[in-house]
Image (tube, helix red, strand yellow):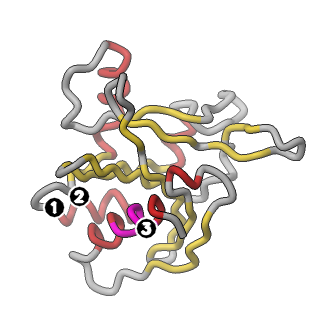
């Protein structure tokens, strides 16, 4: 494994440590996007795809890649069959730690996953609640994203965390 995967797994296991009997199984590192800590896993019998978002120096928010290679070795966006259940995006920025847990349905609705209605995106930005100086486009993204975000920097709301992961 690499540092990004180790960091992502540490954030997930630390977040879920407030619950008893949580099992993380079948960790499978993806062939691509390793610099974003890309792996799949099963948590309590539910499938998750994971990423570790990166802070970029010139723009607000955090960036992540979400693509695969086609048979011609060309980068293409994930489609609606590539994520079974949810996408966990972990963020660690000095003392700020948080996660977005996006259901597959939302990723399809927002055009992030390729579907009959959308061409999909190979990368996108996320805006946790601590990002405040945002342009209008970023504010619009943050508005829909925030309901899938949990701040793990301090005390964690266990009910909210459980709901994001397992409901």
- Residues in magenta, as a range: 6-10
Label 1 secondary element: loop
**Residue at 52% in and 80% down:** 25
Could you give the CA–CA distance between mark 1 and mark 2, rounded to whole angstroms? 8 Å
Q: Which mark is residue 156?
A: 1
Residue 114: percent from left, percent from top: 67, 36
Q: Is residue 158 left or right of residue 22?
A: left
Residue on which the image places disc 3: 6
Residue on which the image places disc 2: 160
- Residue at the farthest bottom position: 21
- Residue at the farthest left position: 155
Residue 141: percent from left, percent from top: 37, 26
Q: Nearer the viewer, mark 1 or mark 2?
A: 1
Q: Examine the image and state in which quarter residue 142 appears.
A: top left
Q: Is 20 a magenta residue?
A: no
Q: Are marks 1 and 2 in contact (CB under 8 Å)?
A: yes
Mark 3 or mark 1: which comes first in sequence? Answer: 3
Disc 2 packing (10 Å; few <14; some 14–19; many ≥20): few
């Amino acid at each position: 494994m690499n540092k990004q995967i180790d960091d992502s797994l540490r954030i997930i296991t630390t977040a879920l440590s407030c619950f008893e009997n949580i099992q993380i199984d079948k960790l499978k590192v993806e062939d691509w996007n390793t610099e974003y800590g890309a792996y799949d896993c099963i948590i309590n019998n539910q499938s998750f795809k994971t990423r570790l978002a990166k802070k970029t120096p010139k723009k607000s928010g955090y960036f992540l890649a979400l693509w695969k290679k086609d048979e011609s070795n060309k980068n293409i966006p994930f489609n609606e069959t590539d994520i079974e259940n949810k996408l966990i995006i972990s963020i660690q920025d000095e003392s700020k730690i948080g996660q977005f847990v996006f259901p597959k349905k939302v990723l399809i609705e927002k055009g992030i996953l390729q579907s009959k209605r959308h061409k999909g995106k190979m990368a996108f930005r996320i805006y946790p609640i601590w990002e405040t100086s945002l342009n209008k486009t970023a504010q619009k993204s943050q508005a829909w994203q925030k309901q899938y975000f949990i701040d793990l920097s301090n005390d964690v709301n266990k009910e909210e965390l459980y709901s994001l992961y397992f409901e």
